[in-house]
Image (cartoon, rainbow, N blue to C red):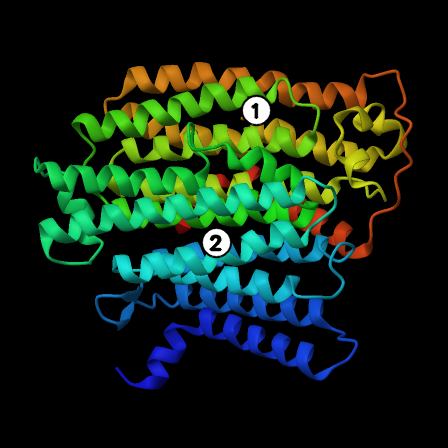
């Protein structure tokens, strides 16, 4: 394969890399850097468009055989992840007008794209670390309150533990198979060898930590609360989307059976129940979203119980719907000089009377996350549980559905505070910027398309 073909197939990554180099150059050359947000937006938008263009052309090849390959499925996954990053950049205008934020975010996105095209555990590990390491810095960079430093440290320590578990699992799989190809993972799924099964468990645990599945979830509430709104939005959507899409590539169409199937059912089920129960007692909006994301991680890992050919479709549609509605909620939050006051749920009291448009958008996001029709969250959950039942795990599907009903309470509680509370919160909100409003409207348009035309979207998967 010639260098021109390789450059074309890696166009999304190359555009992100070009953006990173230019942003670093601006930081070095200019005393008062300007235009960083515009350049970052241009790089991410161009990378997303390139990924979608390559997908429509049916591009598929292996620029680096055995380590990095491109397929229509991976290109569509990259397009979704990169598209979700655009609203994050738009809402970051007020928090990060300048500084290293944009360089770190593009670097993390580069790792996410590498992760989705990995054919070996070597590139998978590199992608995971390149994606995660800038986020540790972003949590601390988003310093808005004293607990931010503690949140960043907890995220760093548990992220390191996940990396260690992944490497140990990979070493066991390599010892049994003699190869670093991720296909060794799917082959080990049907193996009865103790070393192979131990390797599978460690790799799954590493992904559980990254996705914040109970009992490996403790970093998420503190990290989400300690970071600023754009960083929390990035962790809750793009990081989770990339991790789950990488897991879908790792599991491929491998069968789930025996103790591995039980592991992929029991811990996500506990995550669904505990995430929804713990969210009920939260007084911080970001902590509520954190526990909501813990529950949604459970729903997403449920997808791997379903039949192999339908896993990617269910996961991709779910992360797209979940990401769009989370970003809609964050983009609609009215700005406030005091980050802690903005985050308190009490500040939502009577929001409809002060900012009706923001209240309506947040309500739509909450209803979709709860899985209420006709919002896209309902279709996403339907796909997950349909596949679980079709695979014969009816009991797990019923228990998961019962657990999901618990989440309706705290989502409706947010709506009740905004629309039905007579007490007006003593909080003076500012007006959202034009870019933040644009991000909210873009997410609203995407939500309408996903809710009204889910079949046409699923047809692309």
Q: Residues within 10 Å of mark 2 (few under 14, many from 20)?
A: many
Position of residue 32 in the picture relative to residue 205 (left or right): right
> Where residue 436 sits in the image (x, y, percent)?
75, 51
Q: Are marks 2 and 1 in contact (CB under 8 Å)?
A: no
Q: Is residue 416 above or below residue 27?
A: above
Q: Residues within 10 Å of mark 1 (few under 14, many from 20)?
A: some
Residue 372: which disc?
1
The numbered mark, 2 or 1, whose residue comes first in the sequence reads: 2
Cα separation, mark 2 vs mark 1, equals: 32 Å
Q: Which of the image's four quarters has the N terminus?
A: bottom left
Q: Is residue 49 above or below residue 222?
A: below
Residue 451: which disc?
none
The residue drawn where x is 16% and y is 37% is 197
Which structural element holds mark 2?
helix
Is residue 71 in sight in this rendering? no
> Where residue 394 sits in the image (x, y, percent)?
29, 17
Position of residue 275 in the picture relative to residue 115 (left or right): right
Residue matched to label 2: 132
Q: Quadrant of residue 60?
A: bottom left
Is residue 27 in sight in this rendering? yes
> Where residue 170 sits in the image (x, y, percent)?
23, 50
The residue drawn where x is 25% and y is 37% is 201
Q: Is residue 160 above or below residue 204?
A: below
**Residue nearest the viewer, comparing 55 with 440:** 440
Marks 2 and 1: which is nearer the front?
2
Q: Is residue 16 above or below residue 240?
A: below
The residue drawn where x is 61% and y is 16% is 409
> Where residue 367 sits in the image (x, y, percent)?
62, 27
Which structural element holds mark 1?
loop
């Amino acid at each position: 394969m010639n260098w021109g073909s390789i450059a074309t197939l890696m166009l999304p990554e190359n555009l992100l890399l070009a953006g990173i180099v230019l942003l670093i150059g601006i930081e070095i050359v200019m005393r008062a850097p300007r235009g960083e947000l515009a350049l970052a937006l241009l790089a991410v938008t161009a990378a997303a468009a390139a990924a979608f263009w390559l997908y429509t052309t049916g591009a598929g090849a292996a620029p680096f055989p055995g380590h990095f390959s491109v397929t229509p499925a991976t290109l569509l996954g990259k397009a979704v992840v990169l598209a979700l990053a655009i609203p994050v950049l738009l809402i970051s205008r007020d928090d990060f007008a300048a500084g290293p934020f944009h360089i770190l975010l593009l670097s993390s996105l580069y790792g996410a794209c590498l992760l989705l095209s990995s054919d070996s555990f070597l590139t998978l590990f590199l992608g995971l670390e390149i994606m995660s390491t800038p986020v540790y810095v972003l949590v601390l960079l988003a310093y808005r309150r004293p607990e931010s430093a503690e949140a960043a440290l907890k995220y760093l320590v548990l992220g390191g533990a996940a990396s260690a578990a992944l490497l140990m699992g990979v070493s066991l799989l390599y010892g049994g198979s003699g190869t670093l190809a991720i296909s060794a993972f799917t082959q080990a799924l049907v193996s009865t060898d103790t070393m192979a099964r131990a390797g599978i468990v460690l790799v799954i645990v590493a992904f559980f930590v990254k996705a914040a599945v109970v009992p490996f979830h403790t970093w998420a509430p503190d990290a989400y609360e300690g970071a600023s709104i754009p960083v929390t939005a990035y962790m809750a959507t793009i990081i989770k989307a990339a991790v789950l899409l990488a897991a879908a590539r790792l599991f491929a169409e491998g069968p789930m059976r025996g103790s591995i199937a039980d592991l992929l059912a029991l811990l996500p089920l506990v995550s669904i129940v505990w995430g929804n129960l713990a969210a009920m007692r939260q007084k911080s909006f970001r902590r509520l979203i954190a526990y909501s994301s813990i529950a949604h991680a459970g729903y997403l890992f449920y997808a791997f119980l379903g039949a192999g050919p339908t896993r990617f479709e269910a996961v991709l549609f779910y992360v797209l719907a979940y990401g769009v509605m989370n970003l809609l909620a964050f983009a609609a939050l009215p700005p406030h000089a005091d980050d802690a006051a903005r985050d308190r749920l009490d500040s939502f009291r009577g929001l409809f009377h002060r900012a009706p448009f923001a209240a309506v958008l947040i309500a739509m996001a909450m209803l979709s996350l709860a899985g209420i029709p006709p919002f896209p969250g309902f279709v996403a959950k339907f796909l997950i549980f349909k596949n679980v039942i079709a695979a014969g795990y009816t009991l797990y599907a019923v228990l998961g559905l019962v657990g999901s009903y618990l989440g309706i309470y705290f989502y409706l509680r947010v709506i009740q505070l905004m629309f039905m509370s007579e007490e007006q919160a003593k909080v003076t909100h500012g007006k959202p910027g034009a870019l933040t409003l644009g991000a909210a409207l873009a997410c609203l348009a995407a939500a309408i398309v996903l809710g009204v035309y889910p079949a046409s979207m699923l047809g692309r998967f």
